[in-house]
C-alpha cells in the first residue's frame, strides 16, 4: 500500500523532514529490506519491474549474490544498500547479475576476495547474460586473492547496452586485469556498453604480465566491433603493467578521461576505427608514464593533452607502430588511415613512428595524417624517433619549439611559445596558434568520478612522516616500540648496544634510526621481517651478526615467507653491516617468492664479511617474467669480503609486459666479492633479464666478474667509468637474439692488482 504511506510521509514531512520519509518508504513492499541471504533469494524471486531490493546495513560475509530478473526500460529492478557505503560484502563474496534492466548500487566489496574468477560479472553463466543493466556507485577496495600471482578479475562486462558508472575500484594487487569487456559470444559483441565516471584508483606495479586496468575485447574476437564508450573516468596511478587501457576490438570511443601519473599507455592493440579524443595525461615526470599507441586501421586520435610523460619505446607519449603484412589476428595489423590531429604534447620525451620495425613488423603506416599538433619541450629537444619509412603519413601544420625542424618530413614549423596554465589545469600558448587542443577541453577531475561517499586514495605514507618513539638500551624493547608504532613513525635508538632476541616484524612502513653510535646484534635467524603492508628504513645503525645462531642461510632483513599483496619499500642509509659470517650463505637481504618491492635503496653504507649475498633477489624461478623488486639503487657504498654476490637479480622468461627490473650502482667500491665456493654463478653481480642497468664510477677489486644476461625487450645497460682492478670486465650475453650486444661499455679501465 504505497499511497497511504506516501500521504502520511508528506503530511509529516514538515515536522520530521526528509529522513523520516525515506525510512517510511523503505517499509513498502517495493522497497523490500532484506537482512539475510535467504530473504534476499526470496525477494529476487518475487521482484517485479520497478521493485527495489534493499540490503540491510552491516557486513555480509560469504555472500555470492545472484541478482536475476526482468525489469523494464522505465521500471528497472534495483538492488541497493539501506545506506550507500554501509553494506559491506566481505569474505568470499561476489556479484552476478543476469536478465534485463537491472540496476545495482551502493555496495562495498572489501576484506576478502571472490571465490570465483570474478567479483562482479554481468552474467549468471555462459548462456545467461545481463543486458540494459547498470552497476553504479559500487566500491571494490583491495578485494584481492591473498596469492599475489593467482589470477582473478574485478569486473567482467558481458551482454549488451550495459552501463558501469561512478564506481570506485582501488588497489587490485593480485594478477588479472581489473576490468574487461568480454566479446566471447555474439550476444556480447556490438555491445554499446558505457563505462563512465569511474575512479580507477592506484594499482601498484605487479612485476608480471596481467596487471592491465581496462581491456575491451581480446585478440581472438578483435575484428568484431564493440562500440564501447569509455568516458570521463579518472585513472589514478594505474601502474600495474605497460597497458593501462588495451582496446582489442573495433569502434570504441575513449574520450575525456584523465590519466594521472600512470605507468603505461592507452593502446589500440587490436580492432579498427576507434576514437581517442579529449583525454588528458599528466605524467608528472614519473618513470614510464606514457600516452597513446596506434595500431590497426582507421584510428582517430584528436584533441588529447599529454604532459610530463617520460615513457620510451612502445610506452612513449605518442607511438605509431609498424604492422605485420597479412598479420595473424594476435600480432600487429598495419596502421592505416590514422588521423592524429590537434593534440598537445608538453614536456613529453618520446614520439615514436613506425615503432617496432623489424623483419616481421615491416608494414609501415600508410594513408595517415598528422596535423595541427602542438609539441613543446622546455629544453627544445627533438622528441621524434623514426624507425622506418614514414612517407605514408602526411604531416601538415604542426608546431614545435625545437632548435631544428624534423628531417623526415615537411609540415612542421618552429614557433617561440610562452605557455600559461589555464584554469582547467592545462597549459596553452599565450598567443593563438590554431594548433593543439581546444581551450574548451573539459578535464575530468578526481572528484567527478567514483562514489562521492567513499574516500579516494591519498599519497603513500612516507618514511619519517609520523611521530618519533625513543628507545634506550636499558629499556631494551625495540620490539615493543615497533609494535606500537603507526605507519610512517620513527623508532629512535639512543646510543648503546642492543641485543635483539625476537624477530622485529614490520606490518607498516617504519624507520629505525640511530646516530651512528647504535650497535645491534640479534639472536634469531633474521633481525627484520617485512610483512604484507610493511616497509623498512634503516638510518645510522651498526648491525653485526656476532650473536646470530650458527645456522646456514641467516639474513638481516627478509620478507614474509608467504605471498605478499602489498608492495614494500626498503631503505638502508648511513649504516654498517659486519660479521655476517657465523655460517654459510648469510644474506643481508633475502626475499621470498610472491613478494615484490617497489624500491630498494642503499646509500652511504658499508658491508663486510658476509658469507652469502647482499641482495638476494632470485626467488622467482618459474621463468614467467616475474621478479622481486622494481628498483634497486646503490649509491656511495662499500662491500668488502662478500662470499657470494653483491646483487643476484633474476627475472626469467620472455614476457615483455613490465618495465623493470631496474638497477643503479654508482660511486661504490667492491673488494673481494664472489669467491665463496657456494657462489653458483662465479660472479659478483648477476643481472638476468634486468631492463635498465646503470653501473657508473665504481671500483671493483679482486672480485669475480659482473655477469649480465639480456633476455627480452630492449634492455638498456650502461657500464661507464668503472675501474676493474684484478677483476675481469663484465660479460654481457644476448640470450634470445642474434643481434649484436646492446650494452654500452665506455671509459672503463682494467688493471691487474
Ligand atoms: Ca599484458
Image (cartoon, grey):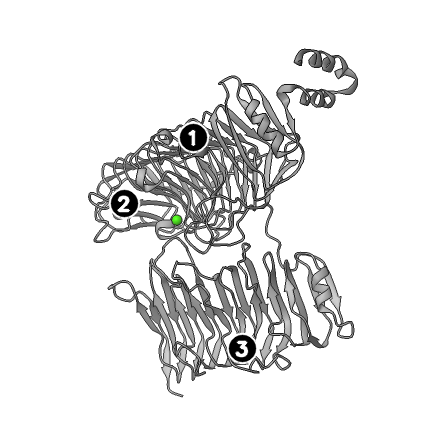
- Ligand 1 within 8 A of label 2's CB? no
The image quadrant that residue 42 belongs to is: top right
Q: Nearer the viewer, mark 3 or mark 2?
A: 3
Mark linked to residue 586? 3
Q: Residues within 10 Å of mark 3 (few under 14, many from 20)?
A: many
**Residue pointed to by mark 1:** 128
Residue 32 appears in which quarter of the rendering? top right
Determine whether, in the image, residue 720 is placed left or right of residue 482.
left
User: What secondary structure is found at the residue carrying circle 2?
Assistant: loop
Q: Earlier in the sequence, mark 1 or mark 2?
A: 1
Looking at this view, is 572 or 434 the one in front?
572
Tell me what residue is drawn at x 25 percent, y 45 percent: 323
Q: Is residue 12 visible?
A: yes
Quarter where residue 249 is shown: top left
Which numbered circle lies on residue 332? Answer: 2
Give the CA distance from mark 3 to mark 1. Answer: 57 Å
Percent coordinates x, y for residue 155 in the rendering: 48, 39
Amino acid at each position: 500500500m504505497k499511497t497511504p504511506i506516501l500521504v502520511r510521509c508528506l503530511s509529516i514531512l514538515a515536522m520530521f523532514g526528509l529522513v523520516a520519509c525515506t525510512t517510511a518508504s523503505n517499509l513498502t513492499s517495493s522497497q523490500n529490506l532484506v537482512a539475510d541471504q535467504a530473504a534476499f533469494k526470496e525477494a529476487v524471486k518475487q521482484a517485479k519491474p520497478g521493485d527495489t531490493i534493499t540490503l540491510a546495513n552491516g557486513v555480509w560475509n560469504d555472500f555470492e549474490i545472484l541478482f536475476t530478473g526482468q525489469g523494464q526500460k522505465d521500471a528497472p529492478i534495483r538492488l541497493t544498500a539501506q545506506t550507500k557505503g554501509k553494506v559491506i560484502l566481505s569474505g568470499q563474496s561476489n556479484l552476478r547479475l543476469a536478465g534485463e534492466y537491472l540496476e545495482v548500487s551502493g555496495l562495498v566489496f572489501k576484506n576478502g576476495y571472490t571465490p570465483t574468477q570474478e567479483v562482479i560479472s554481468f552474467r549468471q553463466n555462459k548462456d545467461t547474460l545481463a543486458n540494459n543493466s547498470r552497476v553504479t556507485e559500487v566500491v571494490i577496495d583491495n578485494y584481492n586473492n591473498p596469492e599475489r600471482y593467482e589470477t582473478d578479475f574485478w569486473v567482467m562486462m558481458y551482454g549488451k547496452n550495459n552501463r558501469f558508472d561512478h564506481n570506485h575500484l582501488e588497489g587490485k594487487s593480485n594478477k588479472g586485469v581489473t576490468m574487461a569487456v568480454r566479446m566471447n559470444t555474439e550476444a556480447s559483441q556490438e555491445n554499446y556498453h558505457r563505462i563512465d565516471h569511474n575512479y580507477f584508483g592506484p594499482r601498484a606495479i605487479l612485476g608480471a604480465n596481467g596487471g592491465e586496468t581496462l581491456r575491451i575485447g581480446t585478440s581472438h574476437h578483435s575484428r568484431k566491433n564493440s562500440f564501447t564508450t569509455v568516458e570521463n573516468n579518472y585513472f589514478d596511478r594505474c601502474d600495474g603493467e605497460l597497458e593501462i587501457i588495451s582496446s582489442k576490438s573495433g569502434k570504441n570511443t575513449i574520450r575525456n578521461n584523465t590519466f594521472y601519473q600512470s605507468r603505461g599507455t592507452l593502446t589500440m592493440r587490436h580492432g579498427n576505427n576507434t576514437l581517442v579524443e579529449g583525454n588528458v595525461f599528466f605524467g608528472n615526470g614519473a618513470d614510464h608514464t606514457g600516452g597513446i599507441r596506434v595500431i590497426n586501421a582507421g584510428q582517430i586520435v584528436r584533441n588529447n593533452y599529454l604532459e610530463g610523460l617520460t615513457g620510451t619505446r612502445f610506452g612513449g607519449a605518442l607511438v605509431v607502430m609498424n604492422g605485420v603484412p597479412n598479420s595473424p589476428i594476435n600480432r600487429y595489423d598495419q596502421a592505416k588511415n590514422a588521423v592524429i590531429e590537434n593534440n598537445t604534447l608538453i614536456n613529453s620525451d618520446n614520439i615514436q613512428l613506425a615503432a617496432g620495425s623489424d623483419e616481421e613488423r615491416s608494414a609501415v603506416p600508410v594513408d595517415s595524417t598528422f596535423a595541427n599538433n602542438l609539441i613543446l619541450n622546455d629544453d627544445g629537444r627533438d622528441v621524434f624517433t623514426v624507425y622506418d619509412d614514414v612517407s605514408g603519413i602526411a604531416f601538415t601544420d604542426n608546431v614545435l619549439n625545437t632548435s631544428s625542424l624534423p628531417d623526415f618530413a615537411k609540415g612542421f614549423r618552429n614557433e617561440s611559445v610562452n605557455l600559461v596554465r589555464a584554469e582547467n589545469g592545462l597549459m596553452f600558448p599565450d598567443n593563438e596558434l590554431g594548433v593543439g587542443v581546444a581551450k574548451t577541453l573539459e578535464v575530468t577531475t578526481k572528484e567527478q568520478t567514483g562514489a562521492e561517499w567513499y574516500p579516494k586514495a591519498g599519497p603513500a605514507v612516507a618514511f619519517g612522516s609520523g611521530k618519533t618513539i625513543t628507545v634506550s638500551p636499558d629499556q631494551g624493547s625495540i620490539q615493543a616500540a615497533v609494535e606500537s608504532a603507526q605507519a610512517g613513525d620513527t623508532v629512535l635508538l639512543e646510543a648503546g648496544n642492543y641485543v635483539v632476541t625476537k624477530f622485529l616484524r614490520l606490518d607498516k612502513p617504519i624507520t629505525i634510526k640511530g646516530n651512528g653510535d647504535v650497535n645491534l646484534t640479534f639472536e634469531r635467524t633474521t633481525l627484520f621481517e617485512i610483512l604484507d603492508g610493511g616497509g623498512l628504513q634503516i638510518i645510522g645503525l651498526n648491525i653485526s651478526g656476532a650473536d646470530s645462531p650458527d645456522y646456514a642461510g641467516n639474513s638481516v632483513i627478509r620478507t614474509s615467507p608467504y605471498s605478499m599483496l602489498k608492495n614494500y619499500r626498503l631503505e638502508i642509509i648511513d649504516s654498517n653491516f659486519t660479521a655476517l659470517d657465523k655460517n654459510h650463505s648469510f644474506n643481508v637481504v633475502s626475499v621470498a617468492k610472491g613478494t615484490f618491492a617497489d624500491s630498494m635503496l642503499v646509500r652511504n653504507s658499508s658491508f663486510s664479511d658476509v658469507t652469502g649475498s647482499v641482495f638476494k633477489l632470485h626467488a622467482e624461478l618459474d621463468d614467467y617474467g616475474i621478479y622481486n623488486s622494481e628498483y634497486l639503487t646503490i649509491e656511495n657504498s662499500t662491500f668488502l669480503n662478500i662470499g657470494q654476490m653483491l646483487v643476484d637479480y633474476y627475472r626469467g622468461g620472455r614476457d615483455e609486459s613490465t618495465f623493470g627490473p631496474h638497477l643503479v650502482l654508482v660511486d661504490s667500491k667492491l673488494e673481494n666479492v664472489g669467491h665463496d665456493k657456494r657462489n653458483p654463478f662465479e660472479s659478483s653481480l648477476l643481472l638476468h633479464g634486468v631492463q635498465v642497468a646503470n653501473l657508473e664510477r665504481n671500483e671493483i677489486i679482486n672480485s669475480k666478474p659482473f655477469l649480465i644476461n639480456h633476455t627480452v625487450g630492449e634492455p638498456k645497460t650502461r657500464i661507464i667509468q668503472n675501474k676493474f682492478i684484478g677483476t675481469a670486465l663484465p660479460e654481457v650475453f644476448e640470450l634470445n637474439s642474434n643481434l649484436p650486444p646492446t650494452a654500452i661499455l665506455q671509459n672503463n679501465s682494467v688493471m691487474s692488482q
